[in-house]
Image (cartoon, rainbow, N blue to C red):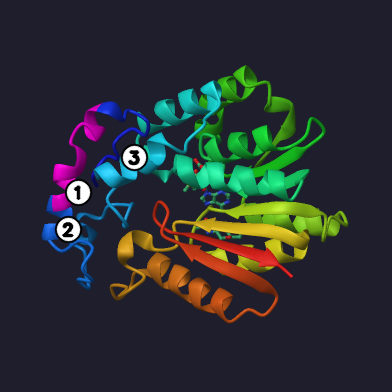
Amino acid sequence: MTQPVPRLSLPATLALGSAALGAAFATGLFLGRRWPSWRFRRQRHLLPPEDSPLWQYLLSRSIREHPALRSLRLLTLEQPHGDYMMTCEQAQLLANLARLIKAKKALDLGTFTGYSALALALALPPAGRVVTCEVDAGPPELGRPLWRKAEMDHKIDLRLKPALETLDELLAAGEASTFDVAVVDADKENCTAYYEQCLQLLRPGGMLAIPRVLWNGEVLQPQPGDTAAESVRNLNERIRRDARVYISLLPLGDGLTLAFKI
Ligand SMILES: C[S@@+](CC[C@H](N)C(=O)[O-])C[C@H]1O[C@@H](n2cnc3c(N)ncnc32)[C@H](O)[C@@H]1O
Ligand SMILES: *[C@@H]1O[C@H](CO)[C@@H](O)[C@H](O)[C@H]1NC(C)=O
């Protein structure tokens, strides 16, 4: 898998300037070719490629990242599977939306090193809480010093067990309709169950976000036996027909679905 260009190491790439953009147009990347050539590189960022000058320009004029959050991102990118992490523009969009809806309580399925959890925690008021679910104790411990550096560790409530158990516990504790935000990014096999449980835990007007819903483009034509791509494809289909939510499917990172509970 191609290692993503570390986000925000921009100037060198920007220097490529419009010449490379012109070349991208000339090679037909924007001309409606059915399969962009980079699809076959199993790259996470489909539209446009993350090292394109256009995308780097968008990031350079958009991203405002807390220093500890940036350190966490750079540290995570050095790890094996560092590209599991949510992308910086996804995290910032979710944080901005969380602020807009005055979120106080958030759910984060799939902590990994805690990049999404920390981005959400930073967007919540001092008494806010992020319940974050993980089965692997290693990555959160790597990230925790940076949660502390951001003075956000008191808001991040890590539950080390399968996410479905935590969701059941929250429902059993009477926390249905009390969460403002849910980010669903643990294993893909259980994603439909996560979606249904999170929808119950969200209040009306709450936001449910699902990153990585394009699955390297394989949701377009899942390989036989690719159960993860099948699960994501089925979930995308289910959400599209779900009258309980308003939705947007955005080409950020490897796809980001936003569903707002009506
Ligand atoms: C794509 S990563 C999450 C990325 C993270 N949200 C971020 O922004 O960096 C998915 C994580 O889910 C965890 N995971 C896998 N199965 C799980 C389960 N059943 N319950 C909870 N977490 C799980 C994996 O260990 C992995 O760390
Ligand atoms: C799906 O959820 C079940 C029940 O919690 C769990 O045992 C299983 O490990 C999960 N699947 C994956 C791939 O994490």
Compared to residue 50, the image places residue 69 above or below, namely above
Name the secondary structure under disc 2: helix
Residue appearing at x 19%, y 71% in the figure: 33
Residue 120 in picture, x, y percent from top left: 64, 40
1 and 2 marks in contact (CB < 8 Å): yes
Name the secondary structure under disc 3: helix
Marks 1/2: CA distance?
Answer: 6 Å
Say which amino acid is labelled 1: Leu
Say which amino acid is labelled 3: Tyr
Q: Quadrant of residue 11?
A: top left
Which residue corresponds to mark 3? 57
Residue 52 in picture, x, y percent from top left: 25, 45
Residue 231 in picture, x, y percent from top left: 46, 70
Task: Tell me, for residue 25, which label it has, or none.
Answer: 2
The first of marks 3 and 2 along the sequence is 2
- Asked if the magenta segment contains residue 57, the reply would be no
Which region shows up in magenta?
Answer: 12-22
Name the secondary structure under disc 1: helix
